[in-house]
Image (cartoon, helix red, strand yellow):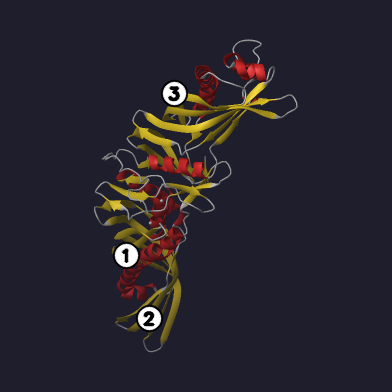
Amino acid sequence: MGATILQLLVVTLIGLCLAQPTPPGLRARMTTKGMDYVSSVAVKILRDKVRGMHINDASGEADIKVGKVKYSFTGMKLDGFSGLDTKVHPIAGRGLEWTANIGNININGDWRYEVRVIFKIKDHGTFTASVSEVRFKMGVSLDHDPQGHLTIKSTSCNAYVGGARVRFSGGASWLYNLFSHNVEKTLKKELTDIICREARRAVDKKAEDFLSHIPLSVRLGDHNEMMLDYGLTAAPNFAADHMETYHKGEVHWATGGKRSSASRPAPFPDSTESTSMLYVWASDYVLRTLADTAQTHGILQQKVNPKDFPLEQRGAFNTTCHVGLCIGGVIPELGKKFPNTTVSLGLASKATPNVTITPDGVHLRFQGNIDFSANLPNGVEKHAFSANTSLFLVANASVNTQTNKVTSQIVHQRVKIGVLESAIGNISDAGLQFAVSTILRIFVIPKLNELGGKGMPVPNFGPVKLLNPQLHLLQNAIMVKTDARYVPKDTTLYY
């Protein structure tokens, strides 16, 4: 019983429910509200699984008036229990304490005895037993290994069984009554030993082995080319109303190579919140290492073609204006050199974008080059000119509670651009500034906001679904607070 509940607790805590940077890039908190919910779920699971659970055979002997009787109990199974109340709560500075109070446990099995009076008497049959006032308390410590896995170890265990009543079936009932109190004493002792022995084995062996095999990273990118490392950087911390874990939160290239050179994460803002079950803080260090890794491996390059936009908007990329405004009208040199065609843009970052989170939004500063090319009728792209650009964006983010998706919107944008070199003659910086600003304002930003408005589903870890998640932008960090619900039929991680 102890093993089942504690393993569930461990899995849920990890599911959320990972040279090491200090302070960490990720911080997670489970409150006593979350731990109480884990306990309630564990009770429901335990009620379904406990029926039929085997108990080790027990034996003993007793002196009675007619001689010495040897007895044994085999094939013992738990037939259910009632009145289970279990709690898991943190002990400040030490670890977790798990307590359980069980009203009654019902057991059935087979009995056999042998007694010599003048001659040997043997008999056997079945029995049912009711054990009452069962309770135990276990201490658990959590730490981390050099690889970043969570480690677990039991530190103490005390069990108590208040009473036991046994009813025998078959054989000579008058003889049972002579040693029934011995049987009940043996059964109580065996159950007391079993509870702590099995619970400690579940923690020190099974749970420890499970934790050592939990992945410490998740793949990112269109082709899974990057990885987010969430290995633990320190031992968990325990306060009176919560437990916290600290994780690297560092993005790196999946096949190895140079690690990010992004500056170390800033300390997380102080927080005493405990009204929700779970809290996760992500430092902007996570985004900076993502940007640095993407820049180092040439991911921050993008080709923009007229065909990427709806048909009614493609005219803006024409070198000769037929209806409305086009880039050739703003930059006449394009229309003169390459009339009656379209322009493609090649964007490339020349330095790692700077990402900062503030309560006002997520701030992105991008430095790069834009290469303008004419799309000739024969399918060849002909270089026209290059520009140096500085782009500043501010986006906000929130969770849509109806769809349970994280949505975003760009709320401010500013661009500064100047000609770097030209193959079509002198180009006005003012005209180029107007053209690019117009393309951003009318086409690119609305397209990005359309994608951001569709949102990304809040991830669920297997059977644990997040309820009413809320996202808050803080100084240098994002905080997500949420409750959770256990839905046992689904066991996959999906987005």
Residue type at mark 3: give it: Arg
Q: Are marks 3 and 1 in contact (CB under 8 Å)?
A: no
Residue type at mark 1: give it: Ala
Residue closer to the observer: 282 or 165: 282
Position of residue 128 relative to residue 453, above or below, is: below
Position of residue 486 relative to residue 310, above or below, is: below
Question: Which residue corresponds to the image point at 40% horizontal and 31% vertical from the top-left?
Answer: 363
What whole-number distance in Å separates the C-alpha atoms at marks 2 and 3? 90 Å
Q: Position of residue 199 (x, y in %)?
A: 37, 63
Question: Which residue corresponds to the image point at 52% horizontal and 22% vertical from the top-left?
Answer: 440
Residue where numbered disc 2 is placed: 70
Residue type at mark 2: give it: Lys
Position of residue 210 relative to residue 473, above or below, is: below
Locate residue 275 relative to residue 366 in the image: left or right. left
Residue where numbered disc 1 is placed: 164
Image mark for residue 122: none
Quadrant location, the N terminus: bottom left
Question: In front: mark 3 or mark 1?
Answer: 3
Q: Position of residue 277 (x, y in %)?
A: 35, 42
What whole-number distance in Å separates the C-alpha atoms at marks 1 and 2? 19 Å
Q: Position of residue 92 (x, y in %)?
A: 24, 52
- Choose the circle earlier in sequence order: 1 or 2: 2
